[in-house]
Image (cartoon, coloured by chain):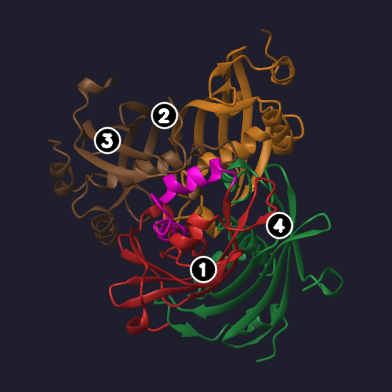
Chain colours: A green, B brown, C orange, D red
Amino acid sequence: MDAPTVQPAAEHQVTVYYEDTDALGVVYYANYLRYLERGRSELFADGPAGIARLNQRGILVAVYAVNLKFLAPARLGDLCTVRTRTKGGSAYRIKLDQQIWRDDLQLVAADVDLVCVDRNFELQEFPEDVLERFGIDA
Amino acid sequence: MDAPTVQPAAEHQVTVYYEDTDALGVVYYANYLRYLERGRSELFADGPAGIARLNQRGILVAVYAVNLKFLAPARLGDLCTVRTRTKGGSAYRIKLDQQIWRDDLQLVAADVDLVCVDRNFELQEFPEDVLERFGIDA
Amino acid sequence: MDAPTVQPAAEHQVTVYYEDTDALGVVYYANYLRYLERGRSELFADGPAGIARLNQRGILVAVYAVNLKFLAPARLGDLCTVRTRTKGGSAYRIKLDQQIWRDDLQLVAADVDLVCVDRNFELQEFPEDVLERFGIDA
Amino acid sequence: MDAPTVQPAAEHQVTVYYEDTDALGVVYYANYLRYLERGRSELFADGPAGIARLNQRGILVAVYAVNLKFLAPARLGDLCTVRTRTKGGSAYRIKLDQQIWRDDLQLVAADVDLVCVDRNFELQEFPEDVLERFGIDA
């Protein structure tokens, strides 16, 4: 997951505020997952507003698995970049490579698997428009 | 709002974790509102599970107004007590006095007004069982 | 605090993500305080990075009091505007009027009092550069 | 990671509040990492207060890697149990198995690697008292 091979499908800028940090003076580990979600949202048509419309159609996108490595800390006032690209998937699984960088230093490496569920959180296929958006043939 | 006059209707213990703190080494100001909500939940029958059942009845309890004073900071590992008492109200408004203490030091003073709304967030009367629970004649 | 009289000293755009919402389908009340802090940060030279440099000088800016009214809810995908203006103050207190709007609907009204403390959270005067920045004669 | 083989070194009870949930009506994925941290804290002498004292000694415990699977959602009012056990490690790495359960249903499976860093976030050995506490020979 080294920089040269990164082919971001979406880049999202995040500024670190107090809300993100903890008493160690760095971003609290769980909050990087909030950054990753903001970055992922860029891959959906019209971002979080588009995701809200998917929900109204009974299409809920949920994270099934996350593998995270915390390589370096971010601090108050840092400007970070969340880079997200689709690694592949199927009608039932979208696999993402997500990275968080500050300038040329990688802070976080994440593999994220998304699934599609209905309002009862039962697994269902992703709709075609979402799969096309992510460049997945199903 | 000095200690001797406090007549808590409910007390709730909170431990400060990293998640609650920020880069200044103290609890982040917004997170005290999470503590206040945990403390308030004790006033409802069966706590947050009871609140979830109210929601299923189309009864949503929302905060309309909060007046907060931050008197002293809490730090990682502190054990705090949230004291909540009903100050009065009506069928349309429940007024609470909430305080957060560490030992004999008051950290936060809060006046909280709750309202009842339906699923469209339109104002409605609190149901009788809730008003009785809070000791309000309506 | 009605719209026509608003003279924003700073405007900050916020997008609502899942992280901000709760099970009622709207932004969780404490999270509006995160939005307010993001908006306030714009008033400081160089934003949160400038605030971090103030901290390194032993100058900590803390919220002493907040009076909040929650007028209407924000939902997933909403684009909100945080409007912040200085209402006045002294060497020991900066008073802000903060509002959160979605289009022409006001969602939140907030009066925020800031104080300056040292690393031991003892009250101290705001430094001149901060007071000048906020247009306060002291 | 099936229930019968679980040998928890620590169990921690968590109640789900609004603050933990999102607009899908379930606990927001990043917030399970807050629950995991609360559960992990039980393994340290005197919990988060003991962790604060480690920090004062210049001993910072950081998460280096997390592998998470989200198996089932938790909802408002749910009472969850965080089960944490040490899987092994060295002077430079403590490996934990953490699970979140509601009754007999597993909600989250997590492998967590902890490292020890100094105030500059440079890697250092865990102190002997911590290694002993976790039952690691080094």
Cα distance, mark 1 to mark 2? Answer: 50 Å
CB contact under 8 Å: marks 1 and 4: no
Q: Nearer the viewer, mark 1 or mark 3?
A: 1
Cα distance, mark 1 to mark 3? Answer: 45 Å
At x 29%, y 21%, the residue is: B1
- Decide whether the magenta segment is chiefly helix, strand or loop: helix
Residue type at mark 2? Leu
Which percent across, then down, holds residue D129?
48, 55
- Residues at marks 1 and 3 on the same chain: no
Residue denoted by label 4: A72
Cα distance, mark 1 to mark 4? Answer: 28 Å
Category of crowding for the residue at label 2, using alpha-carbon neighbours closer than 10 angstroms: few (below 14), some (14–19), many (at least 20)? many
Residue type at mark 3? Arg
Magenta span covers which residues? Answer: D36-58
Residue type at mark 4? Ala
Which percent across, then down, holds residue C58?
66, 25
> Residue B68 has which mark?
2
In primary-sequence order, the first of circles 3 and 2 is 2
**What is the chain letter for disc 4?**
A
At x 67%, y 42%, the residue is: A76
Badge 1 marks a residue whose secondary structure is loop
* Residue A24 left/right relative to B5: right
Residue denoted by label 1: D137
> Residue B83 has which mark?
3
Which percent across, then down, holds residue A98?
70, 69
Q: Is residue C1 visible?
A: no
